[in-house]
Amino acid sequence: MSFAIAALLPVFLTIVLGAGLRALQMVRHDQWAAIDHICYYILFPAIIVKEIAGADFTGLPVGRMAVALILGVIVMSAVLLALRRPLCALLSLDGARYSSLFQGATRWHTFIALAIVPVLFGNGALALAAIAAAAMTPLLNVINVAVLGIYAAGRPPEPRSLLLAIARNPFVVSCVTGILLQVLGIPLPATILAMLDIIGKGALGLALLAAGAGLRFHELRATGATLALATVLKLIVMPLLVYAFTEILSVSGTPQQVAVICAAVPTGSGAYVLAKQMGGDAPLVASILTLQVIVAALTLPLITMLLGI
């Protein structure tokens, strides 16, 4: 437990620093947007390609790990959809607010996960986190866009638009590229590896600063039932679901631990952007994300204790 706290503390302090820099306006809003854009479209895709392409997965149950994560997302989504009517009645949710609850309970903050994994397990485990991204990102995009389209925007998305959104997602593109290089046995040139390594060294810290700058404390409302439910589902229920599926599928050791950590991080900041684009309740998403980052500082050490880290 003490190791986990000591390892995770710098991660959350960096997030706090990002929030402080934004509050002090040492970096302008448009500059933070540019930093987030670079992390999303260039830095992290570069890390994912490098880690997946160059990893040695021999003897590791990466396929079963990916299935456990996918099953966790599917079960959580299915439960939320099955209970939509009673949840909306109980919490007085309209379609937009329900879609925000759905996003808050299912999506994950890739930047935070990819920063935490090497801190806890070493740089070699980054490849496993990249596999988690490959497993969850396409599925989460499809499910959340569909839910927003049906319940918030009032129009189901066209299959073609869904496919285009997935094909253009930089995490999907980088995961597919890395997997193809891995499967085909194509080595990356030493110069390219060196370049990607340089990119990776600065990416994790920069992304955590951007994550902190993205927190919207001024939009954090009094913690109501909707915020509490989204936080419990994402930070406690989701990692327990993935843990249960890894046990069922006989995934143990570092792959199991990485899978559960990836399931235990807060909701991704992309949920806020998607809510604004598709008619969801963006302020509610911002409140959920901000509260989850705060609470994750407590729940993640508890999850690591469960995993025996």
Image (tube, grey):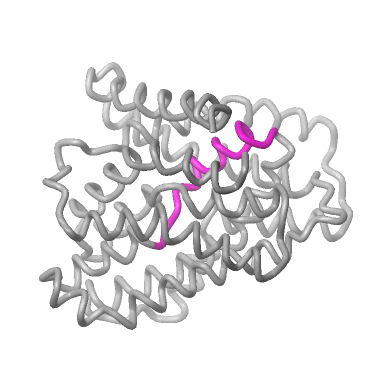
Is residue 107 on the magenta stretch? yes
Residue 39 on image: x %, y %: 49, 38
Residue 126 on image: x %, y %: 67, 42
Name the residue rendered at 22%, 79% in the picture.
154
Residue 133 on image: x %, y %: 58, 55
For the stretch drawn in magenta, what is the main secondary structure? helix
Which of the 4 image quarters holds residue 228? bottom left
| Along the line of sight, the residue nearer the viewer: 70 or 205 | 70
| Along the line of sight, the residue nearer the viewer: 24 or 11 | 11
Q: Say which quadrant the N terminus sits in.
A: top right
- 227 relative to 66, above or below: above
Is residue 256 on the magenta stretch? no
Taking the image as shown, residue 144 lies to the left or right of residue 224, namely right
Name the residue rendered at 28%, 42% in the picture.
290
Name the residue rendered at 60%, 31% in the picture.
119
Which of the 4 image quarters holds residue 195? top right
- 205 relative to 187, above or below: above
Q: How many marks?
A: 0
- 134 relative to 23, above or below: below
Taking the image as shown, residue 79 lies to the left or right of residue 110, namely left
Name the residue rendered at 47%, 33% in the picture.
207
| Along the line of sight, the residue nearer the viewer: 169 or 120 | 120
Read off the magenta span.
106-122
Q: Say which quadrant the C terminus sits in.
A: top right
